[in-house]
Image (cartoon, rainbow, N blue to C red):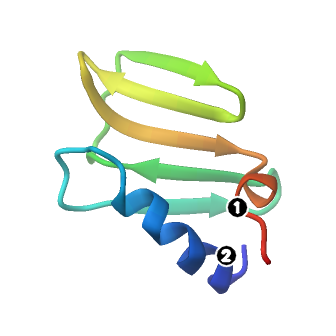
Amino acid sequence: MEKNVLMKSIPYFLNLLVPSTKIWIDYDDDVDVLYISLKKPQNANDSIMENNFIYHYRNDQLVGITVLNAKKNFPIS
């Protein structure tokens, strides 16, 4: 993923209503998947998929987001 794509997506992450002060981001270019962790380790016990986003929860707390087809969801303009 190009650096400017990540930079443009930062406001989206900052607008998330999460009780986390740190965010870990990994990207797998081979499969175009962006992994966002709000807790390390996540220890998620539930996941919900909506469109190309998978939200990972530990009980009621959002602990991570997986973005499928990341380049389509965060296009370079």
- Horizontally, is 20 left or right of 15 in the view? left
- Horizontally, is 6 left or right of 73 in the view? left
The quarter in which the C terminus is drawn is: bottom right
In three-dimensional space, the C-alpha distance between marks 2 and 1, rounded to whole angstroms, equals 7 Å
The residue under label 1 is: 74
Residue situated in front as seen by the camera: 40 or 13? 13
Amino acid at dot 1: Phe
Residue placed at 46% from the left, 51% from the top?
Answer: 36
Amino acid at dot 2: Val
Picture coordinates of residue 38, whole percent (x, y): 31, 48
Helix, strand, or loop for circle 2? helix
Residue placed at 60% from the left, 21% from the top?
Answer: 49
The residue under label 2 is: 5
What is the residue that sits farthest to the bottom in this orientation?
A: 4
- Dot 2 or dot 1: first in sequence order is 2
Picture coordinates of residue 20, whole percent (x, y): 19, 51
Q: Residues within 10 Å of mark 1 (few under 14, many from 20)?
A: some
Do the CB atoms of the residues marked 2 and 1 lie less than 8 Å apart? Answer: yes
Q: Residues within 10 Å of mark 2 (few under 14, many from 20)?
A: some
Query: Does 43 sit above or below residue 67?
Result: above
Helix, strand, or loop for circle 1? loop
Picture coordinates of residue 33, whole percent (x, y): 70, 50
Residue placed at 49% from the left, 40% from the top?
Answer: 65
